[in-house]
Image: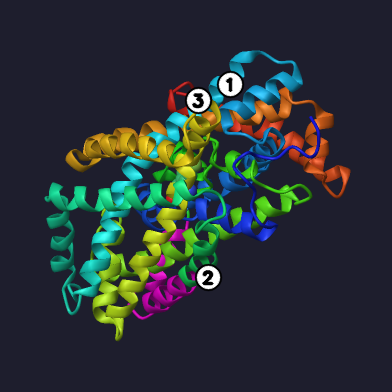
Amino acid sequence: MTDTKKSIHGEWSSRFAFILAATGSAVGLGNIWKFPYITGENGGGAFVIVYLLCVAVIGIPIMIAETMMGRRGRQCPINTLETLTEEAGANKNWHYLGWLGVVAGFLILSYYSVIAGWAMAYVVKAFTGSFSGESAAQISTLFSDLQASPVQQIFWHTVFMVTTMAVVARGVQGGLEKAVRFLMPSLFVLLMLLVAYAMTTGAYMQGLEFLFKPDFSEMTGDSVLTAMGHAFFTLSLGMGAIMVYGSYLPKGVSIAKTSVLIAGADTAVALLAGMAIFPIVFAHGLEASAGPGLIFQTLPIAFGNMSGGWLFGVLFFVLLVFAALSSAISLIEPAVAWVVENYDVDRKKASIGMGFLTWVLGLGTVFSGSFFEKMDYLTANLMLPLGGLFIALFAGHVMLQKHTQAELALDNETEYVVWKFLVSYIAPAAVFLVFLHVLGVFG
Ligand code: PFF
């Protein structure tokens, strides 16, 4: 393979553009909506520590592996795996790993879009002043009313899917790069503002304690699996999203440094979200384990009670929708790139087709909470870690050392050795052990 190979879909305009796009993919509903509620359901601090450990030991090495594989293969994950398998002279079945990812992305987006639709509905609620001066109970009713209305949910799910596919149809550079450039810093600032509000609730320390003080007696095998699954989910790993973004990455960019930066930013956003939400939960006597409605039942209380909260509420939910959008496009990009590469179909038609399929599946989540739960468990807890396990094995044991070394071009030998060790042994072993643990092998 020559160094000059480029993706037919184009390239990011710079290293910074890739960082923005990959951070845009990583930072999303997973950080602000999912991280707080699963932390609440799984007892707090101990769960957070396991999640952080998974990010560091499994997530970062696999992010490096995925980006590296994408840049070397320069195609959608399925075709990239085919090319890299050939290059390494390995068994052809490896390309099924690409398929696992494409299917996972499609399944995740189906429910992701419904939740992003809730955030859209909340932009309107914030705008019309629905939160102002309301009690925690009244705010909770707003959420249950939305849950009880399939028509509203389908409406917003449709708006979100159409927007996502419109961005995907425009391709790598058009629109997306510009949107995330403004989005990321603004989101950060607003989260800080919410944390500042949380400090005034009187339950700030209680919130922090819940988030950071570990009580390992609360941890079950399933909580460990959820924490690990979330590390994959939040970093967009295990399904080829980062791989496909890596395939648009110009040569010469340091993949390792970039990955650490992206994982760091992603983690910071999740922790800030937790620091904003839990104090509000405790100050208002709400349940930390309220589930997927948690942020929708807590943050509006803050907006309803702070001065200028109307404006901040609108801004916050708009930014959340943008954060979801920049993740959603990466969920479906592997599938769209695959269609474009393999069939005589342009990007626009491929986007419409894939978007429609996803939309239909999303109706399952609109009509049934248990459908969402099963889908979430299947994708985040099983498919992504399984995908990640095989990606790690592929990068560590199947690809030739001279190729991974050349592609990563690390500053010194030690960095390469550390990465190679983590990706070849530690990350796969960790995923494997957690799976065994859940199966009850350790009693
Ligand atoms: N990382 C996104 C989030 O935290 O919201 C979700 C996601 C995007 C998961 C892309 C997987 C993926 F490939």
- Amino acid type of the residue tagged 2 in the rendering: Pro
Q: In which quarter of the image is the C terminus?
A: top left
- Amino acid type of the residue tagged 3 in the rendering: Trp
Q: Which residue was labeled with disc 1?
A: 95
- Amino acid type of the residue tagged 1 in the rendering: His
| Image spot of residue 59 (x, y percent) | 60, 43
| Image spot of residue 177 (x, y percent) | 55, 59
Between 54 and 95, the one lying in front of the other is 95
Between 432 and 260, the one lying in front of the other is 260
Residue 202 forms part of the magenta stretch: yes
Q: What element carries label 3?
A: helix
Q: Which residue was labeled with disc 3?
A: 99
| Image spot of residue 242 (x, y percent) | 58, 43
The tag on residue 185 is 2
Q: What element carries label 2?
A: helix
**Residue stretch in magenta:** 188-213
